[in-house]
Image (spheres, grey):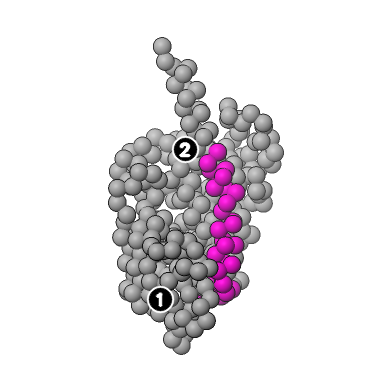
């Protein structure tokens, strides 16, 4: 499948992509135009999450592109940026979905997980078998993991008990697993946990009446003595610096997605001005 240049690519950035990258990008663009664009307005109006889109994106290898364990082919940062642009060009919520799954959730495992955890969890997220969410932000302190984190994890033998609250957690009501960041009750250091959403004491409530990113299911999460085995603790998470490292993984692609939103608006304006009488 050949890649037709976007009318907004004034500087020819697509020419920097390799042949395999162009082929993959063309396939992604065709999928988004045929299977996602026709439905996004309805999804937005209903504030509905499209689980089938997770499957379609996973089939194209879009989740986990940066990681050796899950990338379908060697790819560049420019390619990953273009993929984010294509997603944002169709809908900002779809770009956010990929940013959370591939960037924040899988990034947490890639940055702070052991080799065994990477081998176990990254392929499951990449295939779409499980959907993740990223639980850092809290009601009283936002995402200030250095000073404001109030969620506490207490070790009890080979298990941890986690209690606290999270807010604005993207896809929190539709995910299977949430990466919860909490302070160790013993030393105050920040550590991460892979918490199944069906754990006793875990409750996610959708935040209603949003104006933006309505397809993204943001949630309030309450954890009341949620028990997590030690094997689900991200073994290399040791401080708030780990959360910063995860967030850095997504920054460039967030910027690319914003450009994609602008490209989509530009294309819509060009199409409209060409059709009006």
Which of the two labelled residues, at mark 2 and mark 1, occupies the earlier sequence position?
2
Q: Is residue 239 magenta?
A: yes
Residue 117 visible at all = no
Q: Within 10 angstroms of label 1, few (less than 14), some, or many (20 or more) residues?
A: many
Quarter-of-image position of residue 11: top right
Q: In this view, does 229 lie to the left or right of 112?
A: left
Residue pointed to by mark 1: 162
Residue denoted by label 2 = 90
Name the quadrant of the N terminus: top right
| Front one among 177 and 209 | 209
Residue range corresponding to the magenta coloring: 232-259
Residue shown at the point (59%, 62%) measured from the top left: 245
In which quadrant is the C terminus drawn?
Answer: top left
Residue 107, placed above or below residue 96: below
Task: Kindly identify the residue that appears in the image at 53 percent across and 33 percent down.
Answer: 263
C-alpha separation, residue under disc 2 versus residue under disc 1: 38 Å
Asked whether the residues under the numbered discs 2 and 1 touch, taking CB atoms below 8 Å apart as contact, a structural biologist would say: no
Q: What SS does tag 2 mark?
A: helix
Direction from residue 222 to residue 98 in the image, left or right: right
Give the SS element for disc 1.
Answer: strand
């Amino acid at each position: 499948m050949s890649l037709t240049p976007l009318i907004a690519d004034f500087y020819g950035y697509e020419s920097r992509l390799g042949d395999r990258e162009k082929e993959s990008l063309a396939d992604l663009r065709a999928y988004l135009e045929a299977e996602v664009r026709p439905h996004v307005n309805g999804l937005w109006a209903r504030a509905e999450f499209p689980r089938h889109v997770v499957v379609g994106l996973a089939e194209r290898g879009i989740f986990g592109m940066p990681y050796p364990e899950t990338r379908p082919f060697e790819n560049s940062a420019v390619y990953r940026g273009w993929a984010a642009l294509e997603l944002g060009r169709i809908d900002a919520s779809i770009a956010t979905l990929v940013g959370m799954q591939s960037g924040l959730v899988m990034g947490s495992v890639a940055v702070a997980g052991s080799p065994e955890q990477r081998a176990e969890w990254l392929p499951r997220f990449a295939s779409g078998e499980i959907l993740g969410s990223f639980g850092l932000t809290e009601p009283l302190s936002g995402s200030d993991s250095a000073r404001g984190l109030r969620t506490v994890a207490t070790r009890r033998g080979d298990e941890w008990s986690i209690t606290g609250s999270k807010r604005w957690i993207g896809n929190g009501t539709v995910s299977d697993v949430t990466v919860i960041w909490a302070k160790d009750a013993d030393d105050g250091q920040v550590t991460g946990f892979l918490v199944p959403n069906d754990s006793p004491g875990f409750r996610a409530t959708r935040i209603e009446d949003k104006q933006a990113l309505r397809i993204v299911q943001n949630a309030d999460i309450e954890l009341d003595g949620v028990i997590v085995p030690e094997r689900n603790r991200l073994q290399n998470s040791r401080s708030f610096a780990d959360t910063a490292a995860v967030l850095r993984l997504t920054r460039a692609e967030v910027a690319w997605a914003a450009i994609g939103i602008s490209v989509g608006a530009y294309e819509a304006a060009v199409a409209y001005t060409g059709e009006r009488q």
